[in-house]
Image (cartoon, rainbow, N blue to C red):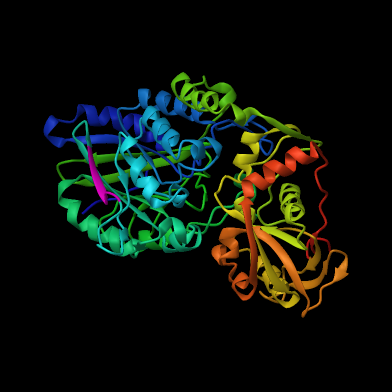
Amino acid sequence: MKSYKMKPLFLSLSLISAATSLPAWAEIKEVTLLHTNDIESVYEPVEAFWRDDIEMMGGIPYIATLIKNIRSEEGTSFLLDAGDIYTGALSKKTKGALPFDLYNSMGYDVITLGNHEFEYGWESLVKTMPRANFPVLNANIYHESSNELLAKPYTIIERDGVKIGVIGVMGIDAFYNTMWKGNRKGLSIKDPTETAQLWADKIRDDVDMIVILTHQNKTAPMQTDKEADAEVQRGFDEDFAMAGKLKGVDVIFGGHSDNGLNEPVVHPDTGTVIGLTFGQGMHLGYTKFTVDTEKHDVTFLGGKLIPVDSNNLKRDEETYKLIQKVRTDNPSLEDKLATIDAPAFRRYYRESNIGNLAADLMRQNVNADIAMLSSGSIRVDLNEGDVTRENVMNLFPFTDKLTVVELTGKDVKELLEYSYTLPYGLAQFSGITAHYDSSKPEYNRLISLNINGKPVSNTQKYTVATYSYAASGGDGYTVFNKGTELSQGDSVTQVLIDGFKQHKKIIVPKLGRQVDVTINR
């Protein structure tokens, strides 16, 4: 039976000394597990405007240096990732090849698949996965026609006499509600907890420690300063529930919700250790254990999140060159499209000026009454000044086409009511002015709605421009299924590029389109 006596991290040095003084037959090893999740191709540092102690955070060439520095100081270490290595302009240009090359360079031992790895379709993913010098896992996504798994379900990594079994799974909601059905056509998914237990039982006698890499929980808040905004932190309920059900599992490293845990959580019933970072490569997860390889006994010593303080880390040249090569091979990415007069920032649960700007450009492109996109679709902020093609491709990096759907006024009101339940953040709009009360019961929060300056009419028909995934009912926007699809045009990304080029000098829209009266009381 494995023990889970949590001890302060500062004791680890004394334990190293104790372990080295034990006779060889004791086989007690100290093991460091480093973990990341949802880096999502954030290749450059971002301004840490919410922190007083750090100026810039993240960037793959800097987290690469941090990883190498820590591993050089540790004895036995393993590096794991819980998925979402794709997305963004450079990933898109290479169909995912660059993310795999970068993870090879950074020395990852294993990753599990996230929903973003399916952005270019599962067939493309399967072709690209062999680039990895490490196992790419998923144990619960399978081909409906053959029942065969899409990826390898588990791996066993041995280092310095320690064998770690790692299993990868994805959550049901992540599979169905954050992935376009065309990109997963012919695939289905099994219960992640049952699947994890199945494989854990199969490999337990062959390993000293079992780690589950999950990509589940609620969808992450797309907001740069989410670590400082408790309101938008989405929790890790599915990981915690899984930890309470699994038997014989030592660690769960999660992803998808980006609900960073500054210190790992130990489940009170099973002792399973749970760790997550805030994503986007701004922190490195660090956990420490002792492993008795004779008794298969694991003791958790402690853990933390280490900020990636970019200004105080040397840039890793190998990963930097890989990134720059893709830019050199695609010079149009550096094209200057426009300038903006102020920073445009994301707010996941609130109206945002960058959401207003993107929605305005979508609506203008097709002369629709309304435009809508989810907060989760907006993947980066924009700094004041020049806006390049790469910036815009990172803003909305997906393959969705701009789709126009005709809805009645009643349906538009239902659309807003759904948005105000905040399932994937607050939807961003153009063409409306709305007041709502977030303290009211769900689907009774909308107080007033004007469309293009006039009160909404329940029976009047309005044209709504949105991204094709939402138009098909994705992200839970099933109200679009009540309407009539009128057209499907260029990709949303191209529409935004064209909009920036056309306007050249852009004034960032002010807030005030969606007013929560609870906040303004």
The residue most toward the bottom is 459
Q: Is residue 152 left or right of residue 217?
A: left
20 vs 377, nearest the viewer:
377
Q: Is residue 15 left or right of residue 504?
A: left
Q: Is residue 195 left or right of residue 314?
A: left
Residue 133 belongs to the span the image colors magenta = no
**Up-down: is 430 above or below 293?**
below
- Find residue 460 and report its image quarter: bottom right
**Up-down: is 446 above or below 53?**
below
**Up-down: is 194 above or below 97?**
below
367 vs 160, nearest the viewer:
367
Q: x and y percent of residue 145 in the render?
A: 28, 64
Q: Which residues are magenta?
A: 151-157
Which image quarter holds the C terminus? Answer: bottom right
The residue most toward the right is 453
18 vs 344, nearest the viewer:
344
Q: Residue at x 66, y 74 (%)?
A: 442
Residue 152 belongs to the span the image colors magenta = yes
* Res 232 seen here: no
**Up-down: is 442 above or below 273?**
below
Question: Total marks drawn?
Answer: 0
* Res 241 seen here: yes
- Find residue 380 and report its image quarter: top right
Q: Residue at x 56, y 62 (%)?
A: 475
Q: x and y percent of residue 245 in the render?
A: 33, 64
Which image quarter holds the N terminus? Answer: bottom left
- Find residue 54 and report its image quarter: top right
Q: x and y percent of residue 7 in the render?
A: 37, 43
Q: x and y percent of residue 8 in the render?
A: 41, 40
The residue most toward the left is 25
237 vs 442, nearest the viewer:
442
